[in-house]
Image: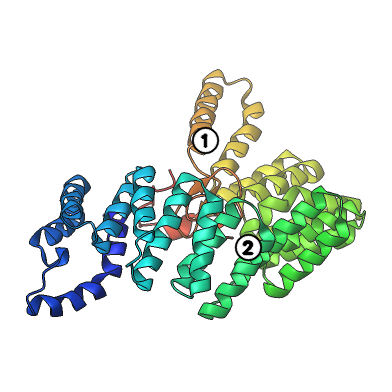
Amino acid sequence: MSEWFFLLIPVAAVSGWWAAKRGNARRGISGPTSDPAFFRGLNYLLDEQPDKAIDIFVKLAEVDEETAEIHLALGSLFRRRGEVDRAIRIHQSLILRPNLSKEERSYALYELGQDYMGAGLFDRAESMFRELVEMKLHRRRALEGLREIYQQEKDWTRCLEVAEQLRLLTGESVSTESAQYHCELAEESLKHGNGQQAVAHLNHARRVDPDCIRATMLQARIAMGQGDSRAAAELYQRVARQGSQFLPEVLSDLVDAYRRSGLEDELSELKRLYRVSPNPALAMMLTDVIQEKEGDGAAIVFLVEHITGYADLVGLERLLDLYAPKLAGDVQTQAAVQAMLAVIGHLRSCRPDHQCEQCGFVARRLHWQCPSCKHWGSIKPVQPESIGDCAGTPVDRRLA
């Protein structure tokens, strides 16, 4: 239903025109929007019957070729059905009409820009949206269209310019997006070996969004590249404070920074971080260090405590791995353990590692921009469920 709801946008946009036409109807002047067929077409859209709606709108358009609102609705329907060429022709013909009002032309320009976007003709779509910005009509939607184009083209400098225009127009914060654009520019600078420029972009990112975790991660990476492992360790620890769920993304680098900086009590530091964020990756890293420094028995004790509190399949799998060698003489139990490991491995493969907080999109790796809803910074690593929190409540199977 929500998909077809957007087909009503051009019709809703011209509802004001229809209200004006009602006055004409009282004086005996008729128009397509006073035709009952027009409302039957709208009902078909609401009933999710777009084919019937298109049939009606096509007939109405044939009766009166000069009716802008019918053509706007028809073009929008064609575009969302994937018939972009037909939508482009309809909206182009509207724009070329000499008697089209400024408001009607602005709607046609926006719809044509959307058509070009759907066809991948970004340069033409950009031209339509820029014209709307200059006309000061539908500026927000036009700027959002431009931002989408520049994001797809990875033109982060222009993204920053459009974000600032949107901030001035709407008064809404664009700090998250702007910080991410600076991070993208920093990544590009690092690829080209320009570390100084990368640092400048990251400083900009931190100024517009002090909580930008990505900027902190990149700063830590630069510090490690420069051989400053202590500064890198401090920055990675800041990541844990900014968003503990992101710790798995930097954990191996953090441990490497600990070791290079000569940190004596690595085990104590990992335990402290675990208390902040008891995620699977950190639990496994801590298990390795405990096993190395204190032996298998201590590692098993830690894992038992871990999975007692958290429904962590990774921890359970590792626990069974540690127990398996102790059962070498018990063939039947060994077979049972291997069967359990196979089941756990299957369940793990069915669970995502990351999920978008905005739309629920799931992924195996971290994306700074959600591929589905296009929000920045909304994808987060999935954390294990607390067993205490789940007791007596239905388990959410959405991620399974």
Viewer-side residue, 382 vs 311: 382
Q: Name the residue under label 1.
A: 349
Point out the frontmost of discs 1 and 2: 2
User: Do the residues bearing badges 1 and 2 touch, measured as CB atoms within 8 Å?
Assistant: no
Quadrant where the C terminus is found in the figure: top left
Residue 273 location, x and y as percent?
71, 60
Quarter of the image holding residue 164? bottom right
Which mark is first along the chain, 2 or 1? Answer: 2
Report whether 292 appears left or right of 387. Answer: right
Quadrant where the N terminus is found in the figure: bottom left
Q: Name the residue under label 2.
A: 159
Q: Which residue is drawn at 57% across and 60% down?
A: 376
| Outermost residue, front side | 98
- Residue 207 shows in this picture: yes
Residue 214 location, x and y as percent?
69, 60
- Residue 276 shows in this picture: no
* 3D distance between C-alphas at marks 1 and 2: 37 Å
The total of numbered circles placed on residues is 2
The amino acid type of the residue labelled 2 equals Cys
Classed neighbour count for the residue bearing mark 2: other residues with Cα under 10 Å, few (<14), some (14–19), many (≥20)? many
Classed neighbour count for the residue bearing mark 1: other residues with Cα under 10 Å, few (<14), some (14–19), many (≥20)? few
Q: Residue at x 46, y 45 (%)?
A: 119
Question: Vertically, is 16 above or below 226?
Answer: below
Q: Residue at x 77, y 64 (%)?
A: 201
